[in-house]
Image (cartoon, coloured by chain):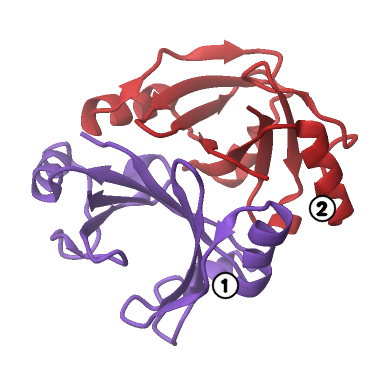
Chain colours: A red, B purple
Amino acid sequence: MIGRLNHVAIVVPDLAAAAESYRGILGAEVSEPLDMPEHGVTTVFVTLPNTKIELLHPLGEGSPIRTFLERHPSGGMHHLCYEVADIYAARDRLAEAGLRVLGDGEPRIGAHGKPVLFLHPKDMHGTLVEIEQA
Amino acid sequence: MIGRLNHVAIVVPDLAAAAESYRGILGAEVSEPLDMPEHGVTTVFVTLPNTKIELLHPLGEGSPIRTFLERHPSGGMHHLCYEVADIYAARDRLAEAGLRVLGDGEPRIGAHGKPVLFLHPKDMHGTLVEIEQA
């Protein structure tokens, strides 16, 4: 069912410093910061030859990653995103297997403008997993 | 400098259950467990079209991931591994930039039989980063 690893999301305490580490020290292709107020994050994309790293920082009081940064003030890996061809077929297969989809269980439009869902980390061995329709 | 994301390493409390989640529920290509006593881990490789997920479980009393699992008993993402063409050139560039290489600072042979080094997570914004010669 799952295809490519679309991205690894990393929450960082200082987005400019993290971007500079990836650009200046690791020599990767790094985007300018992009505010996504509807998702409560500012994002910097690190483009690798085979996948992306998304550096995230909270934006706004209601940011869904603010608590994560409070718990991990030095930053840390936040989630993995796997691609699927059909998000509704994926949702049904995951639900049949007893995995909990976060929120109301329905896919919603993610940060890339595509339908996504998130699985409960306890059902995925401690890792927050995002499923995105490719 | 960095190239492909070689793998994402995830420490899990139950390797068979995690392998079955990836194989049976997510429908991915999953290897049999492989004991690596010289690295203190048992590994299951999840092969995706563009990269790998490595599921890790401690092997032996001196396992380097035992403390991680004690701190994160539900499991969690452990490190990211980026490929470089020349590990010694990478080491010199990282050292010049003031990043701390774990251990004695010299590359050693990693779980894939290739020279690797690990960067201090505090120097990489909370993420443990492995650099592997491709």
How many numbered circles does the render carry?
2
Q: Position of residue B102 (x, y in %)?
A: 25, 59
Q: Camera-side residue: A89 or B76?
A: A89
Task: Please give the residue where the numbered disc 2 appears in the rendered image.
Answer: A99
The quadrant of the image that shows the N terminus of chain B is top left
Residue A133's spot in the image, x, y percent?
A: 68, 28
- Residue type indicated by callout 1: Glu
Residue positioned 25% across, 52% down in the render:
B132
What residue does disc 1 label?
A: B70
Residue A15 visible in the displayed image = yes
Q: Position of residue A119 (x, y in %)?
A: 75, 45
Horizontal side of residue A14 vs A125, given as left or right: left
| Residue at 58 percent of width and 42 percent of height | A80
From the viewer's perspective, is residue A105 above or below residue A121?
A: above
- Identify which residue, A71 or B52, lies in the foreground: B52
For mark 1, name the chain: B
Residue B33 drawn above or below residue A12: below
